[in-house]
Image: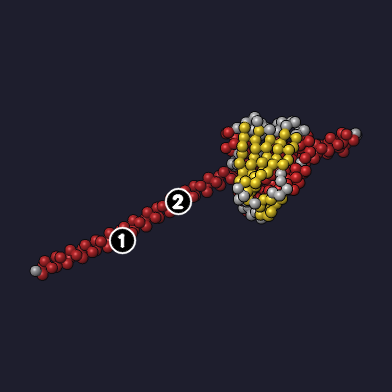
């Protein structure tokens, strides 16, 4: 009887001990699975960070190439024009023409450097927009006036229909950079004598700004690259204008930072429309 009791007791102890051991083993396995998942996530994040760093380094290399080539050329043009103006006996008309060329080159260099410096700063320090209420028509009119000579040079017709009451919430300096880049693209890819239309509408408690050209359009393949870190998308304009290829990438970053959206409506060889959607 005592032997039977002892056997039952030992069996009970064994069962209890086994149950405890199984629970501990189950907990250990669960912890191991959690650690495995965490390690996997860390590896994925590390690979992603490594790829982003490689992409950034490649982009920086291309930017150095841009600065050394694309910025140097228009600066050389400025120097050459200045030398001609100093050393030559020119009529007033010739002086005026050279002055326009000098202004074109200077504006081109300024805008390219502005893009490069703004983008470089954003990569090093991040973007910290200060949204303010912006009167859309007043600001657009001001930006257009700064480069109106480019419109005149290509004999373009500008059709403006922006409502006085349309106000957007956006960082002022960032908006000026965004509009300037997209408007410059419209000019760049517009044939001589064509039309650019800019208008705004209110829709679903948001304001939309449309910038439409009758230019060469964008292929479906290029459209996929417009806002990516791919400077190979840079193209010459209809009058052989050259860009750095970073303008639209910068625009996308500034637009995202201000909780706005950009969309591209395109018909190749017919024209392109950029649609900017803003918070009111």
Would residue 243 appear left or right of 25 to someone viewing this image? right
Mark 2 or mark 1: whose residue is earlier in sequence: 1
**In the image, what residue occupies the spot 90% across and 35% down?**
92
Q: Which mark is residue 24?
A: 1
Q: Position of residue 112 (x, y in %)?
A: 71, 42
Neighbor class of circle 2 (other Cα within 10 Å; few <14, some 14-19, many 20+) is: few
State the scheme by which the image is colored.
secondary structure
Q: Position of residue 83 (x, y in %)?
A: 84, 37
* Quadrant (top left/top right/bottom left/bottom right) for the N terminus: bottom left
From the viewer's perspective, is residue 251 above or below residue 12? Answer: above
**In the image, what residue occupies the spot 71% across and 36% down?**
196
- Residue 131 appears in the picture as rendered: yes
Pick the front one: 86 or 238:
238
**In the image, what residue occupies the spot 56% across and 47% down?**
53
Disc 2 marks which residue?
Answer: 41
For label 1, the SS is helix
Q: Residue furthest bottom?
A: 2
Quadrant housing residue 229: top right
Pick the front one: 272 or 87:
272
For label 2, the SS is helix
């Amino acid at each position: 009887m005592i032997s039977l009791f002892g056997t039952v007791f030992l069996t009970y102890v064994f069962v209890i001990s086994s149950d405890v051991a199984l629970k501990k083993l189950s907990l250990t396995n669960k912890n191991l699975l959690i650690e495995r998942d965490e390690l996997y996530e860390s590896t994925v994040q590390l690979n992603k960070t490594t790829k982003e760093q490689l992409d950034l380094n490649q982009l920086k290399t291309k930017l150095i190439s841009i600065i050394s080539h694309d910025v140097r050329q228009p600066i050389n043009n400025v120097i050459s024009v200045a030398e001609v103006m100093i050393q030559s006996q020119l009529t007033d008309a010739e002086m005026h023409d050279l002055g326009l060329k000098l202004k074109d080159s200077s504006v081109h260099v300024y805008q390219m450097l502005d893009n490069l410096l703004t983008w470089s700063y954003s990569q090093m320090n991040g973007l910290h927009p200060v949204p303010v209420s912006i009167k859309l028509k007043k600001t657009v009119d001001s930006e257009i006036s700064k480069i109106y000579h480019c419109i005149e040079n290509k004999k373009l017709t500008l059709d403006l229909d922006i409502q006085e009451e349309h106000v957007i919430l956006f960082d002022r300096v960032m908006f000026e950079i965004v509009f300037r880049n997209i408007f410059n693209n419209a000019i760049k890819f517009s044939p001589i004598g064509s039309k650019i239309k800019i208008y705004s509408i209110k829709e679903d408690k948001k304001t939309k700004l449309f910038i439409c050209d009758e230019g060469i359009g964008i292929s479906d393949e290029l459209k996929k690259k417009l806002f990516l870190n791919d400077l190979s998308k840079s193209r010459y304009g209809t009058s052989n204008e050259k860009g750095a290829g970073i303008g639209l990438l910068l625009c996308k970053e500034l637009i995202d930072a201000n909780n706005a959206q950009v969309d591209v409506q395109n018909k190749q060889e017919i024209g392109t429309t950029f649609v900017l959607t803003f918070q009111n």
